[in-house]
Image (cartoon, rainbow, N blue to C red):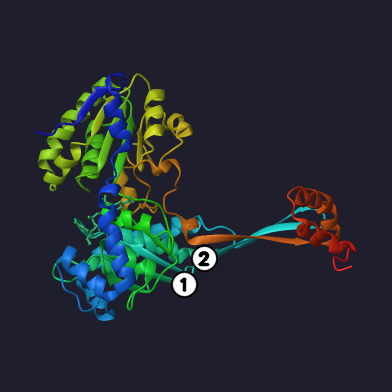
Amino acid sequence: MVMMLFKKLSDVSEAEMQKLLSRGSGLEDVAKTVSAVLSDVRTKGDAALREYTAKFDKVELANFEVSEEELQQALSSISPELLDHLKSAAANIRAFHEAQLPEAIWFMELKPGVVLGQKATPLESVGAYAPGGRASYPSTVLMTVIPARVAGVEQVIVCTPPRPDGSVHPLTLAASKVAGADKVFKLGGAQAIGAMAYGTETVPKVDKIVGPGNVFVTSAKMQIRDVAEIDFPAGPSEVLIIADESADAVMAASDIIAQAEHDPNSLSILITSSDTLAEAVNKEVLVQAEKTARSSIVKASLKNAAIIIADSLEQCIGFSNKFAPEHLEIMVSDPDFVLDRIKNAGSIFIGNYSPVPVGDYASGTNHVLPTSGYARVYSGLNINHFIKYSSIQRISKSGLESLKETVIALAEEEGLQAHADAIRTRFGYKPSK
Ligand code: NAD
């Protein structure tokens, strides 16, 4: 029997609220193990990768890099229909991320003679992690590699865990081809993150690592930030649904079950202003949990789930902003009222016909999103994660004249005489005299 929290918001205890909001990431529990793996990868390179792949993925690999032959075999083993679906998802993801592209360069004239601008430059190299433990995530390959390619990143590599027979799911390999990855490595967990961060004999070091993963992957990403940039912590998946009496209980329940099947640590919450809907969704979740294919993972995950009844839609919104969900579904009769008031959410799905799975796979928005409340400060994966910006100034003598006194006054107050003199030399002052 699945026991979800089912309560009025006013009856949720402080401890229950803390548990929901903090959702215990488990990062601290694995930090030591992960740090030891990273240090071994840093000092022993490929030898450490072989050792940890045997230990954690239960397979001895002579080569980590997927050969062109394996990639071609994977492509030809997939049905033409499935390949078409993969390509169609890829095209939507490409189109959405192309729409995010900034101007390569722009200028503005602040005042006569003072021209300022900004130049966008793609990163040189990126490593994408596609999880592969409990399930395979070819969709994650599309979500990470395509935006990098659209941004113009020169080298894009993929790491994904090998299966016990040493292979990778053919659709993951096909996705790497369709998305345009340069190389694919059969590496998972902390050892994969270490390999991409430090570089080994076979795995090139990259400037930035993106992509979701379990607690080992996330902990490793947090620990290598001295040598490589990361996107953000993206761990066990979560959904929060804000619903009123107009929502469809069967649809809402099926979205809760869909989230729960990711991982025993995934988290689903429904917060609603309607008692009737809360009752109906609760009943429906219990029925669907029994029937679904990954029933045991779903039931484990539902222990973290909650159905909460609030007094008003404003209360639902207040809770959601505090929770900062990775995925937010809005199933209410006036969604714009809610949308206008949402401050923290990784990705927002509006109406009965925008369920999270459509964004997970095919609509084109990115499914690599900040979890555990990080949506308060991080954006989901987008084109800006692969681009850096240089500011530019082109100032004439008369333009500098107009800024001269301000710079000199501020520089002298800071005690930086040479800064002030660098301005004065432009107007006849000779520091050497
Ligand atoms: P994974 O690839 O993240 O992890 C598998 C790896 O973990 C293995 O290769 C192994 O090296 C390592 N590992 C396993 N047990 C270990 C141990 N005891 N000690 C050290 N290392 C160990 O795959 P997963 O486990 O299926 O997790 C995928 C996660 O990614 C799920 O939580 C899913 O919800 C999440 N996800 C998140 C998003 C997002 O955008 N937030 C998107 C897709 C998936």
* Element marked by disc 2: strand
Q: Nearer the viewer, residue 363 or 385?
A: 385
Q: Nearer the viewer, residue 211 or 203?
A: 203
Q: Quadrant of residue 71?
A: bottom left
Residue marked by disc 2: 122
- Give the residue type that dot 1 points to: Glu
- Give the residue type that dot 2 points to: Pro
- For the point 36% across and 68% down, the residue is 196
Mark 2 or mark 1: name the one nearer the start of the chain.
Answer: 2
Indicate the quadrant of ligand 1 in the picture.
bottom left
Q: Does mark 1's beta carbon lie closer than 8 Å to ligand 1?
A: no
Q: Quadrant of residue 51?
A: bottom left
Mark linked to residue 154:
1
Q: Does the residue at mark 2 contact the one at mark 1 (Cβ under 8 Å)? A: yes
* Element marked by disc 1: loop
- Visible in this render: residue 79? no
Q: Quadrant of the C terminus?
A: bottom right
Q: Nearer the viewer, residue 14 or 315?
A: 14
Q: Quadrant of residue 78?
A: bottom left
Residue 343 position in % (x across, y down): 46, 36
- For the point 20% across and 58% down, the residue is 133
Q: Is residue 291 left or right of residue 276?
A: left
- For the point 52% across and 58% down, the residue is 101
Task: Find the distance from the CA under tag 2 to the CA under tag 1.
Answer: 8 Å
Position of 242 relative to 208 (above/below): above
Q: Is residue 371 left or right of residue 169?
A: right
Q: Residue furthest bottom?
A: 69
Position of 417 relative to 410 (above/below): below
Q: Quadrant of the N terminus?
A: top left
- Visible in this render: residue 109? yes
